[in-house]
Image (cartoon, rainbow, N blue to C red):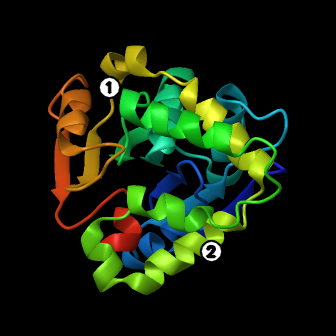
Amino acid sequence: TSTMNVEDTGTGPAILALHGLGGGAYFFRGLAERLPDYRVVAVDLPATPDASMARWVDALGALVDERIGHPVIVLGHSMGTIIGLEASARWPERIRAAIFVGGVPQVAPHIRERLSDRVRALAGATDLGGWGKRVSPGVFAASTFGARPEVVAAFERLFEMQSVEAYVRCCMILLSANAEAIVPTVTVPCLAITGEHDQYAPPDAVAAFIAKVPGTPAVEVIPDCGHLPFLEQPD
């Protein structure tokens, strides 16, 4: 876990917050402030040359043992949903509940095409300059551009500060991931949350995914929201 940046906020039952592609621990800072009775442990997944889904899951398991010491609520956003599912297969004893935000077990075909095109377009690029504005319409609801332009601008700026190599590496990990077979094996209480206008994980796809989880997991659809509910509709 030495290469993993961690933001550890609050006290109480621990929520392990896992960001999606192009994100970071900062996604969850507002969430931590709004959940005073919980401890929110958010990480920056290391996009090192040897990064892989398996290495992330192993490092996160070690983090739970070393830093938290008791079972956690796993909150996975987007790609973090897949990581959370993989974790539930690898170390179920460390998980007490799961929250899936804007996530599905594998990339949908239209998103796969979009990301594959993006990876090809970034071949030979030295930075992500200009890509923030190209990416943001795919993650924010149209209403967010009008209501919270400063949030969109901050996301675009931070997105462009990533290294191209790290971003492409994470794209490839996401494109190769498939946790469909794990879904029926999840036994902890689950909650699925998605935005009304989420393009990556639209409400119908999330409902179909969560219906395969045993028990009666809940689904919450946030209106006027795209793929980043904790930035678009934090309250």
Dividing the picture into quadrants, the one containing residue 196 is: bottom left
Q: Are marks 2 and 1 in contact (CB under 8 Å)?
A: no
Label whose residue precedes the other's in the sequence (2 or 1): 2
> Residue 147: where, in percent of width, then height?
29, 84
Query: Of residues 119 and 43, which is closer to you in this image?
Result: 119
Measured as percent of width and height from the top left, residue 92 is found at: 49, 27
Judged left or right of residue 170, residue 134 is left
Residue lying farthest top?
Answer: 181
The percent position of residue 206, horizontal first and vertical second, equals 25, 38
User: Which residue is the site of mark 1?
Assistant: 187
The residue depicted at 63 percent of the width and 45 percent of the height is: 64
- Callout 1: 10 Å neighbours few (<14), some, many (20+)? some
Residue displayed at 62% across by 52% down: 68
Task: Please tell me which residue is depicted at 47% across the width and 55% down the height of the picture.
Answer: 15
Query: Which residue occupies the foreground of this view, 219 or 152?
Result: 152
- Image quadrant in which the C terminus is located: bottom left
Q: At 46% across and 63% down in the image, what residue appears? A: 136
Q: Amino acid at mark 2?
A: Arg
